[in-house]
Image: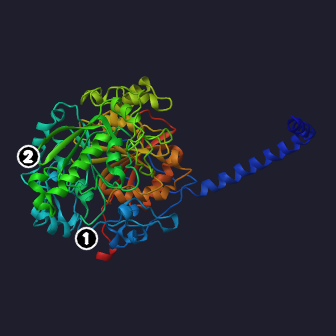
């Protein structure tokens, strides 16, 4: 109390000096305002090359906007992936392939240049033809063609790569392979299974086939000696991410996927305390399925081709089965080269394990948040589903497409989240999507296939566009409210990300980027030019960006976009708000000056 009394006494003694200070402050503010007005009037800049369409508005650069330009990166950066850069691999350890994880460059080492396309890059083949073919010049990789053509991953024919739909474990074609899977897992046919992840995806033929069956797959692969697996997937129009299960959790919340798949992905599931399989357990929905084909499944008939012994493979299979049992998986079905395990749909099994002090792996303690998944280390423990959420298991989840508009139980875990807010968000995005289509008629056509919503809440835009021939990667900031579980519960896909860093994808992999207030929310952490350079890197030539931002930031963004060689126009929002504007931009196709 003595401290407070002294403080108040000092305030009273100083009150007689308040009036002169106030008058001085007013005079200084007036002078500042006058000088600022003079400065602003002399420094307005025009962005003259914005495309004109609809009710376009001239873009005047506000005082904080500066004219910028960016040089071209050298041609050897045409496939630059900043956070998974092979040039930097020697700096990191080889244990558990940690060098293939995300290692982003520090600020002083970030590239401030425009990534060029390959020589003679051509406009991509459009969906659905792109599923089966792409231009060789757009992904000019000979190694994977020579090494994998005998397994029918792909083959070069003239100016194109052709994707026959083969794979190491499906010599009769991916469709026959998935047909057998459906016989083993009837839930794949009736909308029960909607989301899946393919670890070690090759060129994503499995995920591509499932699209025709109403199942949305995230195809996951590292940047490794199988050149550009993820780039091939995205060029084909199939969802994919660069990633590897190594020492860190995958960038997904717990209970995300209905099914996980590994087709001879060569992940050592039983090594290092089973941490890789524990991560699959974490991201798999209760009652979900894990599918494995390849060693050690069907070892009785396959061991001779695996350069091993039948005894070794029998031992490997028994270790795998024991590990899965300790994680509350049960063998669901098995035939030929495919084995299917199902994760326990409830907590009964985990309660039994907790009574055994010698059980391994142990249950994770409460200090480890199940959904923490951005640079979060893997732990050798079982993430037990929360007993308070009783409708997140696969059987309780509404079937697709009903689940898209059903209010997920996990909305209540979002601060301020509730069913009413979820419904209003869905309605809002239906209105916005309709407006977007008026401003950009390419949405809904074969010109736009790969879409990214760079800072979604509940996946509202993706839900509003679900009937169009496109898919959406829903990105939730690692610093924002954790709404990504709701996105997955709706039957959509997405990932955590921090836009102060580069995204886990190759250059030129998305047709449309959507931003809703990202620069406003992240302006205190991320420098705008780096975010927009990253947008330019991942956007295809002739691709589009729709940027919804405050009026304050819109003009600055337009100025930076001009430096990226984009053409932009400013449009009114659907509500014609004065506080918020839309920028509709298109990236131009250009070639490196080194090739001229």
Q: Measuring from the top left, give residue 33's x and y in whole percent.
A: 70, 49
Quadrant assignment, res 443 = top left
Quarter of the image containing the C terminus? bottom left
Q: Earlier in the sequence, mark 1 or mark 2?
A: 1
Q: Measuring from the top left, give residue 121's x and y in whole percent.
A: 24, 65
Left or right of 573 in this view: 183: left
Q: Measuring from the top left, give residue 456's x and y in whole percent.
A: 40, 40
Is residue 447 shown to the viewer in this render?
Answer: no
Dot 1, crowdedness within 10 Å: few (<14), some or many (≥20)?
some
Please state which of the two labelled residues, at mark 1 or mark 2, is closer to the viewer: 2
Q: Measuring from the top left, give residue 46's x and y in whole percent.
A: 48, 56
Residue under the point 10% across and 55% down: 302
For disc 1, the marked residue is 119
Furthest residue in direction top, as rendered:
420
Is residue 215 shown to the viewer in this render?
Answer: yes
Q: Dot 1 lies on which element? A: loop
Which numbered marker is on residue 164?
A: none
In the image, 149 versus 363, the foreground residue is: 363
Q: Can you say whether 87 is above or below 413 in the image?
A: below
Left or right of 303 in this view: 9: right
Quarter of the image containing the N terminus? top right
Kindly report the distance in space between the C-alpha atoms of the residues bearing marks 1 and 2: 38 Å
For disc 2, the marked residue is 176
Q: Dot 2 lies on which element? A: helix
Q: Can you say whether 112 is above or below 561 in the image?
A: below
Quadrant assignment, res 72 = bottom left
């Amino acid at each position: 109390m003595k401290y407070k009394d002294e403080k108040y006494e000092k305030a009273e003694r100083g009150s007689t000096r308040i009036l002169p200070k106030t008058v001085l402050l007013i005079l200084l503010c007036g002078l500042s305002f006058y000088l600022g007005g003079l400065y602003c009037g002399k420094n307005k800049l025009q962005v003259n090359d914005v495309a004109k369409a609809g009710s376009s508005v001239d873009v005047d650069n506000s005082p904080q906007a500066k004219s910028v330009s960016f040089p071209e990166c050298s041609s050897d950066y045409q496939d630059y992936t900043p956070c998974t850069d092979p040039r930097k691999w020697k700096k990191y350890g080889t244990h558990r392939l940690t060098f293939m994880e995300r290692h982003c460059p520090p600020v002083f080492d970030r590239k401030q240049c425009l990534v060029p396309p390959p020589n003679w890059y051509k406009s991509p083949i459009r969906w659905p033809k792109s599923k089966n073919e792409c231009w060789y010049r757009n992904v000019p990789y000979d190694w994977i063609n020579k090494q994998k053509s005998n397994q029918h991953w792909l083959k070069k024919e003239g100016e194109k790569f052709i994707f026959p739909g083969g794979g190491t474990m499906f010599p009769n074609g991916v469709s026959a392979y998935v047909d057998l899977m459906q016989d083993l897992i009837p839930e794949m046919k009736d909308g029960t299974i909607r989301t899946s992840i393919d670890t070690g995806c090759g060129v994503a033929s499995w995920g591509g086939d499932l699209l025709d069956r109403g199942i949305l797959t995230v195809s996951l692969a590292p940047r490794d000696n199988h050149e550009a697996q993820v780039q091939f997937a995205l060029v084909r129009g199939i969802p994919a991410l660069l990633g590897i299960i190594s020492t860190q959790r995958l960038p997904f919340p717990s209970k995300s996927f209905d099914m996980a798949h590994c087709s001879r992905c060569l992940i050592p599931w039983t090594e290092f305390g089973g941490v890789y399989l524990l991560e699959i357990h974490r991201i798999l929905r209760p009652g979900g399925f894990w599918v494995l084909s390849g060693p050690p499944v069907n070892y009785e008939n396959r061991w001779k081709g695996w350069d091993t012994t039948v005894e070794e493979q029998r031992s490997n299979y028994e270790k795998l089965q024991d590990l899965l049992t300790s994680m509350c998986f049960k063998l669901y079905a098995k035939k030929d080269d495919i084995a299917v395990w199902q994760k326990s749909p409830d907590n009964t099994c985990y309660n039994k394990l907790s009574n055994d002090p010698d059980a391994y792996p142990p249950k994770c303690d409460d200090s480890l948040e199940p959904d923490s998944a951005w640079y979060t280390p893997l732990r050798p423990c079982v993430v037990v589903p929360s007993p308070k959420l009783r409708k997140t298991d696969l059987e309780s989840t509404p079937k697709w497409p009903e689940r898209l508009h059903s209010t997920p139980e996990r909305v209540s875990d979002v601060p301020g989240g509730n069913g009413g807010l979820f419904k209003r968000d869905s309605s809002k995005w239906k209105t916005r999507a309709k407006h977007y289509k008026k401003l950009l008629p390419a949405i809904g056509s074969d010109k736009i296939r790969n879409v990214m919503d760079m800072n979604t809440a509940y996946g509202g835009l993706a839900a509003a566009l679900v009937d169009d021939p496109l898919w959406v990667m829903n990105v939730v900031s690692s610093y924002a409210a954790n709404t990504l579980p709701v996105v997955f519960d709706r039957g959509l896909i997405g990932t955590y990300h921090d836009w102060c860093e580069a995204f886990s994808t190759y250059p030129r992999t998305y047709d449309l980027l959507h931003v809703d207030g990202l620069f406003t929310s992240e302006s205190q952490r991320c420098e705008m030019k780096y975010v927009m350079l990253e947008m330019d890197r991942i956007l295809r030539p002739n691709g589009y960006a729709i940027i919804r931002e405050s009026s304050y930031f819109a003009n600055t963004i337009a100025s930076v976009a001009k430096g990226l060689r984009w053409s932009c126009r400013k449009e009114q929002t659907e509500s014609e708000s004065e506080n918020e504007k839309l920028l509709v931009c298109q990236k131009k196709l250009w070639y490196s000056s080194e090739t001229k």
